[in-house]
Amino acid sequence: SSDTLAATVPGFAIQPEMVKGGIRVSGRTSFSSGIDHVDWLLFHTMTHTGLIRRSEVEIIDDWEVSGLRGTGSKGVLTKEV
């Protein structure tokens, strides 16, 4: 639908694992802005980019940076997604 939203996740430090049908990622990223309002994550590693349902990751409310609270940034934890 035209109202589907996605946020980017810079998971460049996470090494993707090649599995049948795609890749698997596990690890914690430092932030994703606007993650509270999306259905999908555009997840980037150094070698791959893929879509992950937001419901498949854990959101870590750890971004307490002065002056940037309005970005809605939070950490992201993936466990064999």
Image (cartoon, helix red, strand yellow):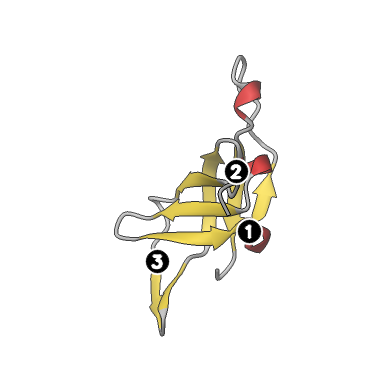
Spot occupied by residue 74 in the image (x, y as percentages of width and height): 62, 39
* Residue 36 image-quadrant placement: top right
In three-dimensional space, the C-alpha distance between marks 2 and 1, rounded to whole angstroms, equals 10 Å
Q: Secondary structure at mark 3?
A: loop
Query: Which amino acid type corresponds to the residue marked 3 in the rendered image?
Result: Pro
Secondary structure of the residue carrying numbered label 2: strand
Residue 11 position in % (x across, y down): 44, 51
Instruction: Please name the residue shown 48% across and 47% down the image.
Output: 9
Task: Report crowding for label 1: few under 14, some 14 to 19, many 20 or more residues within 10 A (C-alpha).
Answer: some
Q: Is residue 11 above or below residue 15?
A: above
Judged from the image, the secondary structure of the residue bearing numbered disc 1 is: loop
Q: Which residue does the image show at 61% across and 22% down from the upper left?
A: 65
CA gap, disc 1 and disc 3:
15 Å
The circle drawn on residue 75 is: 2
Asked whether 54 or 65 is in front, the reply is 54
On the image, numbered disc 1 is attached to which residue? 57
Q: Which mark is residue 45?
A: none
- In front: label 1 or label 3: 1
Q: Residue furthest left?
A: 47
Which residue type carries mark 1? Val
Q: Which mark is residue 16?
A: 3
Q: In the depicted view, which residue is nearer to us: 39 or 9?
A: 39
Q: Earlier along the polypeptide chain: callout 2 or callout 1? A: 1
Q: CA distance from mark 3 to mark 2?
A: 18 Å
Q: Using a 10 Å C-alpha cutoff, classify the residue at mark 3 as few (fewer than 14 neighbours), some (14 to 19) or many (20 or more).
A: many
